[in-house]
Image (cartoon, rainbow, N blue to C red):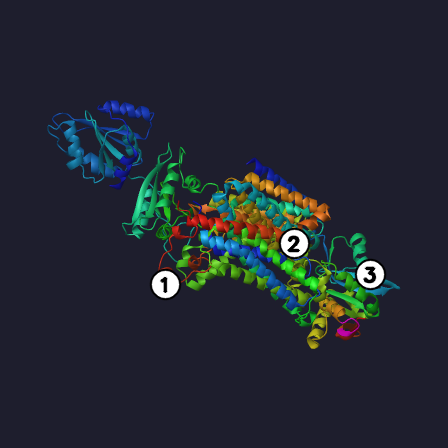
Amino acid sequence: MHNMEYLTQTVTGDLMLISVTELKERLNSMFSNSADLSFKEINLKSRRHLYGAVITVEGLCSKDELAQSVLNPVLAHDFCDDTPKQALNAILNSVSGSCDMTEFSSEKELISYITSGFAVIALDGCEKMIAVGVQGYAYRGVSEPESEVVQRGVREGFTEPLRVNMSMLRRRIKNPDLVFEQMTVGSQSRTQIMLCYLQHCVSPLLLRKVKERLKDCDLPTVFASGYLSEYLEDEKTSRLFSGVGISERPDTVCGKLTEGRIAVLVDGTPAAMIVPRLFVEEFQGIDDYSNRTYYASFIRLIKYLSFFIAVFLPALYVALAQFHPEYLPEPILIKTAESLSRTPLPVMPEVLLITFVYEMMKEAGLRIPKSLGHAVSIVGGLVVGESAVNAGIISASTLMVVATAAICSYVTSPLYPPITMLRVIFIITAGVAGLWGMVLVTAVVLISMCAKTSLGVPYMASLAPFSLRTMRDVFIRASWKKLGKHTIRVQKFPETKEA
Amino acid sequence: MEVKYSSRRLMLTLMLCACSVILLQNRQVSPRSSFTVNLLCMLSGLGVCALTLLPSILIMRRTGSDFLTLSARYTPKLRLPIAVICAVYFEYVAAYVLLPYTDMFCEKYYPGVRPCLVGLCLLAACIYAALKGVRIITRFGVFLFVFALFTNLLLFTGNISLTDLSNGSFAFSADRDDVFGAFIYFCTPAFVSAIYACIAGETHSFHFRQPLLSLLFTAVKFALVMFFVTFSLGSYATRQDYQSFILSRTAHFGSFAGIESFFIALSTMSVFMIISLALSCMVKSTGKKRPMLEIVMYTLILFVITLLCEFSRTVKAFFSNEGILLGLTFVVAVCLPLAYCRTGGIRREN
Amino acid sequence: MKIKLVLLICLLCCLSMQGCQTSRQLETAAVIQSVGVSRINGQLCYTFYKLSSDEKPPKTVVPASSFEEACRKAGVQYIPHFSLAKLKMLLVHRELVNEVMRRDMEYISTRTYFSPVAYVCVCDDSALNALGISTEEQHEAEQQLLLCRQRHPKVKLSYISIYNCMRKNHGNVFDIVYLSSVKELRAEPMPLNCG
């Protein structure tokens, strides 16, 4: 019944026409005789020769359900001397076996219902109509999310239909505290989005902010959650790192909800946006909470190390090779110098070139058909890699450095975009101003990260502003006995702007 | 309403600023005096720093605010003269810190680079930090603190193998002129009191042990640097400027050396933080909400000072004078807060 | 936005002005591993041994009256882009100790780029020649120096410790390492009068 209520809340409009023929003409005109609009005229068993129509959009509703819940009972029923209005009431109250039915009278509602997969029953001479929930369209089944693979844990990921995703959350939190609040965004696409939060955990101020920002979204179409994430970011803060988290896993989302966060599900997107998002969360994986404490902590530290390697290693290599060769240990210095002396390009352009080539290959690998992927790997690995080194176009040491950084950047995959950008910035800085330039840019980046907020919560919270209480799940993961004692709500982080 | 931040974090940041004085030390503090005498000079110097903090602490305890906020609230007519005093003082502090840094960088770390260009790049970064405000700069201080710990660990442990107690003396021998110079030198970290005087009101949860601990850590850092300069570098320390830098060059672990890069990184970030704080204090004294223009203007003045210092030794000597710095510090960190200490108190009682 | 753009352009200009022209490219830099001071054909010469993967370390002989002059001439005439930051050993011929030791040590103490933890020792002709034969010999010499210090803890090996002793014990005697190579490389303490 939720469906009906939500839809009636969102649509209002003019009164309907009374004649079915006029209605048909009107709809055909509005939909420009669209082929998928189905207008099945029906003659009811009645002494008054009641005439009506069942309006659907093909492909959005289940034909079996339509036959069982609407056509068969309505056509079989004897309406005797009922007036159209009485007949409509009879259909609503006794004839149809569907539990998902509602009466309405406006044109906007009519359009909203039929484009949402409802079957609409209209009777000639009656100003009201009935919408029957017979939705049944093809969608991808629940499968394991590809971007958040776990070793131990559930294999269920979000899928495209909003209701399925909602049910996945509800199954995990069987608690009336879990609230789904529907909104519609996109003036043309009229995309349904669902705000999910735990009533007693969420900060009312954070919730208000999220609602206000989503209401301010003036996009005509919203086809994916990415369209909305920018609207959820705080104004005047750095956009390099994202203040909006994305997860394809219902268990991750449930975990975040218990910490007072708000999830936004978008119809047609198999992922939830979670706000507020903190920097330290990028290093937390769902596996950390299934593994032993010591191992989870070890992996956490590896992730932080990988982040630093991914951002700084190529730049460090450029700075050392170009400005401070004396800092390299002797064996590495000799080998690197020999390797570099055989290549035509200076170090910085060489590193940049390999970085760009790698990014191109990655993009190609993502977009080409899977059957060609193998061929591209061979071309990338052998031709661009080994052959270029053998031909003396690039040096082996440079290739190794860039490859190591590339591998490390996937350890914290949500941070891949900022890591890539920062890597390029640091390479250029290192080539121009050496280690000193890197230090200066690091300081600026740190300042911008410290200044960033996500819904008023400092993005670098736990580290700066430092909070010992929240450090139990930052560099090391404390045991569940400690973590489970009390949950730290996101609005309780120091220096959170609640006003 | 602006969210207040922890007083502990501000003290941590100020401690890092105070420690930068020893990072930029450009001569052996008192080469003819023993380590013990230098240590005493340092302790008395830091004692003076503690005294200069007292008026601001008093205001903070009584009103939960700082003298700049009180002046804006109770004596709006004095805003301009106070803004001028603050601008002059913090320009001086920024120049006092920037000049030895650019010198050290261009003389020791990377010869051949023009000091004004190093200064310009650093100042451009400082503009960005100052625009973000003191709260953000103190957050940056948390990361810098971790980096400082790591660098100091490398610096000191890397010099242990060179330590030879016969290089210096623990005996109580001193040269009178040197001792006075050393005492004045160790009073220079008092500029952090002036910074504190301007921004203390933005913090909460103040406790007396915070400044004490900060000064104690600063003292430990100073003492360690002095110890290693005296006993690891020995006479070699007198041959070159910037002893702390030389200490980082001599630090090594077997064949692993190059600690000076960490040292330069630490000094760069410390100087970056001090100048950003100074710019923020200057801007706060003007009371502007959107201070872009003011920050750029103050930075340009600072850059002009750096340029002048590159060409004129007199100007450089003026901006490197510890006496002037201490005099100005006395005005900003002691006199002004003391004046408002009474004002704030009286108004509060009313 | 305009201000940001102008600042960015200024920053980029400055960065490009200050760094590129002074960079020491790794592939062209000559990293000096050891320096030998000896007299060749009656002329005081400083031999710079470069760090290399070759069997025989490339060397450059610079005739000069002092280390200061040798460094200046080396940079201008013989080895452009040379770096002494990784210098491991400074070997002075035993006959030249009195002539060059104090003067060169004084000069080095004023230079930042010289590694203060480099080894300084005295050696004979054959030890100096051995260094030029192969890189292995250089490693062997280094090992011998370390062994000697292990056996005789009072012996002064690093530049900074020798310099401090020279300043401290003016006119007195302390031990440094003497490296000889009659049949094989051998290091032993040798008293040095720093008067």
Q: Crowding at label 3, few (<14), some or many (≥20) Cα neighbours within 10 Å?
A: some
Q: Name the residue under label 1.
A: A481
Distance in Å between CA atoms under marks 2 and 1:
59 Å
Q: On what subunit does the disc labeled 2 rest?
A: B
Image x and y of residue A429, in percent: 61, 47
> Mark 1 and mark 3, same subunit?
no
Q: Are marks 2 and 1 in contact (CB under 8 Å)?
A: no
Image x and y of residue B105, in percent: 67, 52
Magenta segment range?
A: C169-175
Tell me if residue B169 can be seen.
yes
User: Which mark is drawn over residue C66?
Assistant: 3
Identity, as a three-letter code, of the amino acid under mark 2 = Gly
User: Which mark is drawn over residue B323?
Assistant: 2
User: Relative to B347, is B193 on the left or the right?
Assistant: right
| SS category of the residue bearing label 3 | loop
Front-most of residues B146 and B209: B209
User: Relative to B174, is A375 on the left or the right?
Assistant: left
Image x and y of residue B341, in percent: 49, 51
Q: Extreme right residue here? A: C42
Residue at x-position 13% and y-position 25%: A48
Distance in Å between CA atoms under marks 1 and 3:
72 Å
Identity, as a three-letter code, of the amino acid under mark 3 = Ser
Identity, as a three-letter code, of the amino acid under mark 1 = Lys
Distance in Å between CA atoms under marks 3 and 2:
42 Å
Q: Are marks 3 and 2 in contact (CB under 8 Å)?
A: no
A487 above or below B309?
below
Q: On what subunit does the disc labeled 3 rest?
A: C
> Mark 3 and mark 2, same subunit?
no
Front-most of residues A232 and A318: A232
Q: On what subunit does the disc labeled 1 rest?
A: A
| SS category of the residue bearing label 1 | helix
Q: Extreme bottom residue here? A: C151
